[in-house]
Image: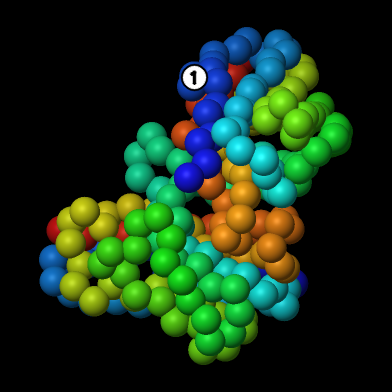
Amino acid sequence: NAGVTQTPKFRVLKTGQSMTLLCAQDMNHEYMYWYRQDPGMGLRLIHYSVGEGTTAKGEVPDGYNVSRLKKQNFLLGLESAAPSQTSVYFCASTLTRGTEAFFGQGTRLTVV
Amino acid sequence: GIQVEQSPPDLILQEGANSTLRCNFSDSVNNLQWFHQNPWGQLINLFYIPSGTKQNGRLSATTVATERYSLLYISSSQTTDSGVYFCAVEVSGSRLTFGEGTQLTVNP
């Protein structure tokens, strides 16, 4: 039981490049989330999903897209990376609303 | 949206000391969790505690939902307790909102 796994752990991108971050969970959770964490700050929600095939915007969605084609996977895409997207990205999942959240180990992304 | 305030923002302790971290929130919540982010950046679940009191070893937490606050107690602190402690709450819309954290440093 791996819990929540993020791929990759580290990435460096050039401005304008695109990439996809993968989040996989093996707990059969319905809800999945993508957060970003900037230095000295808490986590801010980018997008989330309440079930397979559904997504919704969070607090800071601009510049990102997501997809939830399979229940166990939640993908975060950057179509044209900008230096402002340099951050640590965390994925999380919960069984349903109001239940305990479990986080992945994070992806450190640098855009130069 | 809901406001989550944590205090103190920074705390420096000597090993063996006790401490209390506080989380205030501005609305009724149906979920509250405490996390420890270690120096390697990992977020570790400490407590899922929308109400009541829980204990796990040297750590305990109390949430008084009607008064909109939660407390995290660390007793006999150790250097491995260092890191950032986050409180996160959920009101509605299926998402956690995080406070800005308390940076704890425990010196030997």
Q: Residue at x 62, y 28 (%)?
A: B23
Q: Nearer the viewer, residue A106 or A101?
A: A101
Determine whether the residue tagged by mark 1 lies in a helix, strand or loop. strand
Q: Position of residue B1 (x, y in %)?
A: 48, 45
Q: Residue at x 35, y 45 (%)?
A: A38
| Residue B57 can be seen, yes or no | yes
Q: Position of residue A102 (x, y in %)?
A: 65, 58
Q: Write down the chain letter for disc 1.
A: B
Q: Residue at x 34, y 63 (%)?
A: A61
Q: Nearer the viewer, residue B78 or A106?
A: A106
Binning the other alpha carbons within 10 Å of mark 1 as few (below 14), some (14 to 19) or many (20 upward) gives few
Q: Quadrant of residue A30?
A: bottom right
Left or right of B54? Residue A109 is left
Q: Position of residue A55 (x, y in %)?
A: 48, 76
Q: Nearer the viewer, residue B46 or B16?
A: B46
Q: Position of residue B68 (x, y in %)?
A: 68, 30
Reading the image, the residue beneath label 1 is: B10
Q: Quadrant of residue B88?
A: top right
Left or right of A31? Residue A6 is left
The amino acid marked with disc number 1 is: Asp
